[in-house]
Image (cartoon, rainbow, N blue to C red):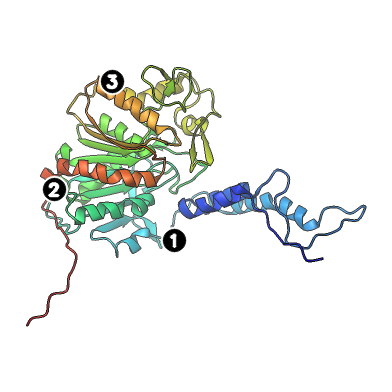
Amino acid sequence: MGKERCRKRISVGTIVSGLLVLRFPLGFPEWVLILCLGARRRKERWTLCSPPQQLQPGHSTPKGTTFMRRLLWPVALALLALLPATSSVRAFDPAQRLNRRIAGHLDAYTNHHGVDRRIWSAALGQRRDMYVYLPPGYDPSKRYPVLLWLHGINSDERTFVKQAVVDLDDAIASGRLPPMIVAAPDGSLNGRPTLFGTNPLFLNSDLGRFEDYVTQDVWAFLLQHYPIRPEREAHVVAGYSGGGGAAFRIAIKYRETIGVVFALSAPLNFRWMDCHGRYMANFDPNCWGWREDVNRGREVVGRFYGVVAVRLRRLIYPLFGRGPEAVEQLSRENPIEMIDLYSLRPGELCMYVGYGGRDEFNMDAQVESFLYRARERGLPVMVGYEPNGRHSWRTGRRLLPDALGWLAPLLAPYAPPACVLLPTQESAPEE
């Protein structure tokens, strides 16, 4: 008889987890858990690559299979125990490589390679990483508009470098966007992105004064070290996902300083429910309710990459608690309700929001309810929409050019003359 083909069975979770590792900028501890979750099966996790064995009476399953199954989780937990909870020194600085590619320049206020240039945050009582982008032809004797970029959950300041800098730099270098200074501070809880940890969402809460960190510490640092235009119309706050929701909250609260806000795939109505109490329902102005409690902690409110479930308790409990007061606090920080709470009037903020129609966190319903309320109050909001867009930076990147096109004429009166870089050509030989 011919030899049977040797096969190794790997669960679908393992394959998906491996793809996530390649695309998601998380630390090693989280990926140890993800890979173990993916490798686990209810009945059979691994089939060893060995010829079929004929079991004799009194003999059990091959020891290798049992050993692998029993060893998987202890090894994972041991690795997690040995690894530090946070990492104060990061081995890789994406700015070093990117500065060789872009026309502008990235100032890295980070703790890479043992050189600590992080900014001090009095609000958090610790040092924090931040990147500052300077446009092509930057001249410190001239004043520039400024944009604060706030990252989403499970991210840190490095996602700005990896995702948005090249597009911004191309737009400025080609003259499609006025020269500006862009700052991307780290708003993660422990200084690194985490899939399973808590996300401060740039809020003041028991986790720390993260809103004050942005509006006081980061803002003061930028004014002290860079030539920023004083007009509020030249000050922009923007963000993606949870950072986009934070951008709207900060802009509404501090509109004496901020004049422009834009967000991509942002939560703009934390309390969205339809009239039947369903969070994942599409927006319908004739069937619109509000979340009145946070008791259903295990309720799934989204999925990363359509796979990793995110439950209500993870997003709400660390920031707002779980009792009756949680809904009150949630309401005070809910962008749609802040329209009335802070008496936002037409002309006080220039607003833009971009979103996808198939968002795995149902941000489309949140955004559409916000837009409905804004229209009721006479507040103009420019909109970018991707019908098949999902909650991913791929959708965000498709929405970004339209957002920047909307932003350009707003900042043009406050920007110095652009340094437009043309493609280099070899000069023709003289005859």
Tag 2 and tag 3, C-beta contact below 8 Å: no
Tag 1 and tag 2, C-beta contact below 8 Å: no
What residue sits 22% from the left and 50% below the top?
181
Would residue 118 be found to the left or right of residue 196 on screen?
left
Image location of residue 71, percent across then percent down = 71, 53
Quarter of the image for the N terminus: give it: bottom right
The local secondary structure at tag 2 comes to loop
Mark 2 or mark 3: which comes first in sequence? 3
Q: Which residue is mark 1?
A: 91
What residue sits 32% from the left and 41% below the top?
239
Mark 3 or mark 1: which comes first in sequence? 1
Labels 3, 1: front one? 3
What residue sits 21% from the left and 48% below the top?
224
Q: CA distance from mark 2 to mark 3?
A: 33 Å
Q: Amino acid at mark 1?
A: Ala
Would residue 325 be found to the left or right of residue 9 on screen?
left
Q: What is the residue that sits farthest to the right in this orientation?
A: 57
Q: Which residue is mark 2?
A: 415
Q: Amino acid at mark 3?
A: Asp
Vertical position of residue 76 compared to residue 235: above or below: below
Q: Which residue is mark 3?
A: 340
The local secondary structure at tag 1 comes to loop
The local secondary structure at tag 3 comes to helix
What numbered label is drawn on residue 157? none
Image location of residue 19, percent across then percent down = 52, 52
Would residue 53 be found to the left or right of residue 382 on screen?
right
Circle 2 packing at 10 Å, graded few (<14), some (14-19), many (20+), is: many
